């Protein structure tokens, strides 16, 4: 794609409904793809399928609408920016009826040279041993082998109720449920409960309302002065929270001074006094952009993962083509040129983002390089108090060189997670170490 920026994954090919004769829709993989042959088994009532694919720590989430009564079909995963042969791909499929999750299957595939294919069967995967029915007491032999570990056998009324059977990749929890990417009681892992009216999405707790964020186990309104735009972001005196951003209240103009009085008549009448000048009104706010991010993982020396949002914190429209921002880090590998991958962009098309790496000479603490991101004219403008929406970036090299960033946690722009917090989760917060510019002039943040 343009500017050396490419989407890492693209999911294509919806599940295809089968004909009445029950013919399978099998397909072999095309070069550079992973093909999933999916059998819905007893879940033909499902009308939605979510597909989560993780390779090298990067997750791509796609939601597909299923044809009515679909039973089998294929999902093709495309890798337009170098097929990562030899790497492990974790694939999680979740079926829904409306908004209710009814089944989930997870599998791991080592990507073979050229292309790969695998089968995922919702009728048998996720509990092949059928241990859920082994201790059922309702019938003499009911549930001895179980079907998919879901409900035991058909012998007795209570057969197969002995244990908790979970899909592959999910763990049984002490509360009798399975950890999953959407279970609010055990969100992503056992015991991680989403509280305060929050929901579980993609293994992390969040909030349904667009004006809320998950702060300290509760959903809060981020349009108030105490949590303006993010958790704990308080507006100072003289500011107001508008659309989740602290804004300076524009000053009004000065008043006009009154004229002097006319001197009284007479041979030598004195002149009138000069009227006092009006007071100067307080200035309004200047155009300003800031960068909010989620906390990062510092465990990989191959890639830097960055989730961010660019906000206009002024009462004026700003063309995105005038906006740039910089992530400052220490580049360890110099023989393999660094690249940038756009994994997701909520509102700005990936091909309207530009990227360049610039060396810092002399090097400073935490940085000998910075990545500068810009926007094409076609990206449009940031209206007053608006934002770009979430943008997910991945810095690295085309060969995943392990020496790309030898110590990511010491990078100047690195944003650590709080104890117990998962990377790329929680609420977006403004970062002073990621600098933003308007027409090349520093608008927010502090350079190293």
Image (cartoon, rainbow, N blue to C red):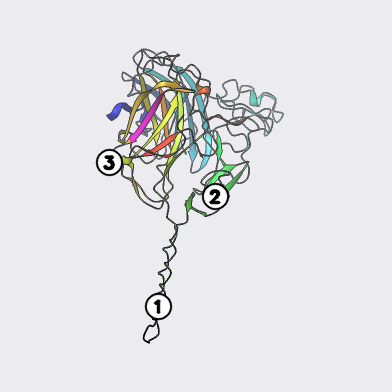
Where in the figure is residue 388, as x and y percent of width and height? Answer: 39, 42
Where in the figure is residue 85, as x and y percent of width and height? Answer: 39, 14
Is residue 307 placed above or below 280 in the rendered structure? above
Closest to the camera, between mark 3 and mark 1, is 1
Residue 272 is marked as 1
Query: Could you say whether the residue bearing mark 2 is in a helix, strand or loop?
Result: loop
Q: Residue at x 48, y 43 (%)?
A: 98
Q: What residue occupies the far right of the structure in this picture?
A: 137
Counting every numbered tag in the picture gives: 3
The quarter in which the N terminus is drawn is top left
Residues 202 and 418: in front is 418
> Would you identify the image quadrant in which residue 400 lies?
top left
* Gap between marks 2 and 1 measured at Cα: 48 Å
Q: Which residues are magenta?
A: 369-374
* Gap between marks 2 and 3 measured at Cα: 33 Å
The answer, for residue 229, to whether it is visible in the render is yes
Q: Residue at x 29, y 29 (%)?
A: 3
Q: Residue at x 42, y 32 (%)?
A: 392
Say left or right for 165 vs 108: right
Q: Residue under label 2, please give it.
A: 235
Q: Residues within 10 Å of mark 3 (few under 14, many from 20)?
A: some
Q: What residue occupies the far bottom of the structure in this picture?
A: 266
Residues 92 and 318: in front is 318
Where in the figure is residue 187, as x and y percent of width and height? Answer: 59, 34
Query: Could you say whether the residue bearing mark 3 is in a helix, strand or loop?
Result: helix
Is 234 colored magenta in this rendering? no
Q: Residue under label 3, please give it.
A: 378
| Mark closer to the chain start, 2 or 1 | 2
Q: Chief secondary structure of the magenta span?
A: strand
Residues 30 and 40: in front is 30
Say left or right for 133 vs 50: right
The answer, for residue 75, to whether it is visible in the render is no
């Amino acid at each position: 794609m343009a500017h050396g920026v490419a989407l890492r994954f693209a999911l294509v090919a919806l599940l295809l409904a089968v004909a009445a004769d029950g013919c399978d829709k099998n397909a072999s993989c095309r070069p550079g793809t992973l093909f999933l042959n999916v059998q819905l088994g007893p879940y033909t009532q499902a009308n939605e399928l979510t597909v989560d694919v993780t390779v090298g720590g990067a997750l791509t989430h796609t939601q597909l609408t299923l044809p009515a009564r679909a039973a089998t079909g294929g999902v093709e995963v495309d890798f337009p920016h170098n097929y990562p042969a030899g790497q492990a791909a974790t694939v999680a499929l979740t079926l829904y009826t409306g908004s209710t999750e009814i089944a989930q299957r997870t599998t791991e595939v080592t990507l073979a040279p050229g292309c790969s294919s695998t089968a995922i069967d919702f009728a048998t995967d996720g509990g092949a041993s059928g241990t859920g029915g082994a201790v059922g007491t309702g019938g003499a032999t009911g549930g001895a082998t179980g079907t998919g570990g879901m409900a035991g056998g058909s012998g007795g009324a209570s057969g197969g109720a002995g244990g908790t059977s979970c899909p592959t990749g999910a763990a049984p929890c002490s509360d009798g449920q399975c950890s999953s990417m959407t279970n609010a009681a055990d969100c992503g892992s056992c015991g991680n409960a989403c509280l305060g009216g929050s929901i579980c999405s993609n293994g992390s707790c969040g909030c349904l309302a667009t004006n809320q964020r998950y702060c300290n186990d509760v959903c809060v309104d981020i349009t108030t002065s105490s949590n303006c735009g993010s958790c704990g972001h308080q507006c100072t005196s003289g500011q107001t929270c508008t659309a989740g951003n602290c804004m300076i209240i524009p000053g009004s103009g000065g008043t006009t001074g009154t004229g002097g009085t006319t001197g009284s008549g007479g041979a030598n009448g004195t002149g009138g006094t000069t009227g006092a000048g009006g007071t100067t009104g307080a200035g309004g706010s200047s155009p300003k952009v800031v960068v909010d991010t989620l906390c990062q993982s510092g465990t990989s020396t191959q890639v830097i993962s960055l989730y961010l949002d660019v906000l206009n914190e002024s009462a004026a429209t700003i063309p995105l083509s005038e906006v740039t921002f910089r992530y400052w880090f220490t580049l360890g590998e110099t023989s393999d040129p660094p690249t940038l991958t756009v994994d997701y962009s909520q509102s700005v098309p990936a091909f309207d983002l530009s990227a360049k790496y610039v060396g810092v000479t002399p090097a400073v603490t935490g940085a000998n390089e910075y990545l500068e991101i810009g926007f094409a004219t076609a990206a449009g403008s940031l209206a007053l108090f608006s934002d770009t929406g979430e943008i997910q970036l991945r810095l690295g090299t085309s060969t995943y060189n392990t020496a790309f960033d030898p110590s990511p946690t010491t990078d100047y722009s690195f944003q650590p997670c709080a104890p117990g917090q998962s990377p790329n989760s929680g609420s977006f917060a403004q970062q002073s170490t990621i600098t933003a510019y308007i027409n090349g002039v520093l608008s927010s943040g502090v350079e190293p």
